Image (cartoon, rainbow, N blue to C red):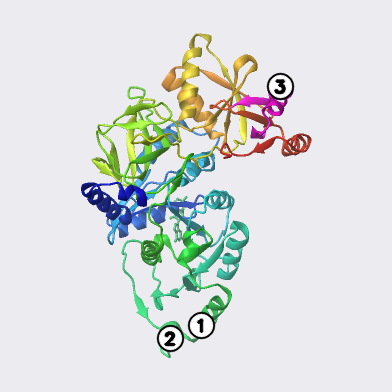
Amino acid sequence: MQAAVVAMGIGDQLILMSNIQEIKKRRTFAIISHPDAGKTTLTEKLLLFGGAIQTAGAVKSNKIKKTATSDFMEIEKQRGISVATSVMTFEYRDLLINILDTPGHKDFAEDTYRTLTAVDSVILVIDCVKGVEEQTERLMEVCRMRNTPVIVFINKLDREGQNPFELLDELETKLGIRVRPLTWPINMGASFKGVYSLYEKMLYFFAVNKTKIERDVAKINLEDVELPSLLGQRDADQIREDVELVEGVYDPFSQEAYQSGELAPVFFGSAINNFGIKELLDTFCDISPLPQPRPSDTRKVDPMEPKFTGFVFKIHANLDPRHRDRIAFLRICSGKFERGKFYKHIRLGKDIRFSSPFSFMASDKKVLDEGFPGDVVGLYDTGNFKIGDTLTEGEVLQFSGIPSFSPEIFKEIVNLDPMKSKQLEKGIQQLTDEGVAQLFTLDLGNRKIVGTVGELQFDVIQYRLQHEYGAKCRWVNMNISRACWLTSSDKAILDQFVRLKGNQIAYDKDRNPVFLAESDWMIRMNQENNPEIQFHFTSEFK
Ligand code: GDP
């Protein structure tokens, strides 16, 4: 970075200075939760505060309510909605905030995991009645892999929830992260009176309020003799006692510990009632990280570098068969992205340019002339992109940290129309490039196995193959529960293992050998018998 500045002329330095101003304004994050905890509601309220939307109800849930026997219209609708709300940008205070939407449905979890590689922090929503749920744990595992900073919002305080101390204990034990409350609730459910902000020393009074964004506050110290007249003697005593306990039990808040992913500040509120949102948003603006450096196969790329780099983390297909183009979502990592300029597509080794890249302002698409680190750009794509592809101004590097996770359900795809085998082949290649599912090929007979994290994906693939590619298929269940990527420092040993295991070995799209295991027990046994071979549960093992 220093060297880069020294080598530049005055003009370049001025450009760099203006880039830095832009970068400092950006905050890119995702809201994550188990379905129904309140992610959509919170997103909408944040947009209301930011002035990006005027009315409640403008943000549609991207939830699919039905499961395996889903109706495809619903999937189509869902996909239509999810492209409109994939990135929501709004301005608040002097910041430009990008919220990246993540599908709540478990069957689309891989999409969420990948989106998490493109953000700099997350807000995790917890339902105070249900506490930490299954999907919350999985999502947090992904955040922990990358030390993503997390702010927790405990929602639905207007309901009779669990004791707040117990909720915080549960967060620490189940999510493996230290927490630090920054507000504290005064009762819950029918007797919920509001929250006390431990930092502003401010009481926020709760009122059922689905439309307005302002509410009553009182600046007051807990020792103040006026407190009982505001809350009643019993609640005044209780909040004093609770806060004393909080200050005694939890370490003081540290921005550094938060930004390194070790400590999660916690807020209490009720999204549907616009309660607790402003404190959350203001604190987010104060403490959340700017666009962060990103690892690549050759070096760490700093957002402040003058030259443009970025990577594709999501591909969205157009389901209308007359318009087969897709939209690739590019996260800008460094420099400035400019419309019409040639950039190097590293995997294909060719230069390409984009005449109408676009940005996302709430649900509007807008042609974008330039973008900065932290921004997400939509690029029309006719089949050039795969998830993880890198664009640069010429430097050969590939962003890393976008792993594939082992699928959980595996099925062999069988072609039902021999006249359409080319279409099927092309369709399944393209759909798996989009990241809808993972494709593994068995060398023997060129059999194709598709792996996903949810049953719904198989319905989606079958439907799309038929409607977009004119190919009919059926699925044959496979007795496989895990895929492990294999490596070894001794190539001969790995080759021998691959030969010996025959049909238990398949190849992923990059021709990496993968061990398809029936059970965890089978993996353990093979690990014990083959100590020179490493078994990996994600595709990235550098
Ligand atoms: P998502 O699945 O996480 O996106 O959850 P939604 O935002 O769709 O919310 C799920 C349900 O919880 C909806 O019926 C919301 O109206 C409701 N909800 C959201 N916030 C609150 C809240 O603060 N209190 C109560 N009682 N319900 C809420």
- Cβ of mark 2 under 8 Å from ligand 1: the answer is no
**What type is the residue that disc 3 sits on?**
Arg
Q: Which of 26 and 87 is in front in this view?
A: 26
Q: Is mark 1 on a helix, strand or loop?
A: helix
Q: Residue at x 41, y 31 (%)?
A: 346
Q: Quadrant of ligand 1?
A: bottom left
Q: How crowded is mark 1: few (under 14 residues within 10 Å), some or many (20 or more)?
A: some
Report if residue 152 is visible in the image: no
Q: What element carries label 3?
A: helix
Alpha carbon distance from label 2 to label 1: 10 Å
Q: Which residue is disc 2 drawn over?
A: 227
N-terminal label among 2 and 3: 2
Q: Nearer the viewer, residue 147 or 142?
A: 147
Q: Which residue is disc 3 drawn over?
A: 499
In the drawing, what numbered circle is on residue 240?
A: 1
Q: Quadrant of residue 165?
A: bottom right
Q: Residues within 10 Å of mark 2 (few under 14, many from 20)?
A: many
Asked if the magenta segment contains residue 482, the reply would be yes
Report if residue 94 is visible in the image: yes
Q: Which residue is drawn at 27% across and 47% down?
A: 8
**What type is the residue that disc 1 sits on?**
Arg
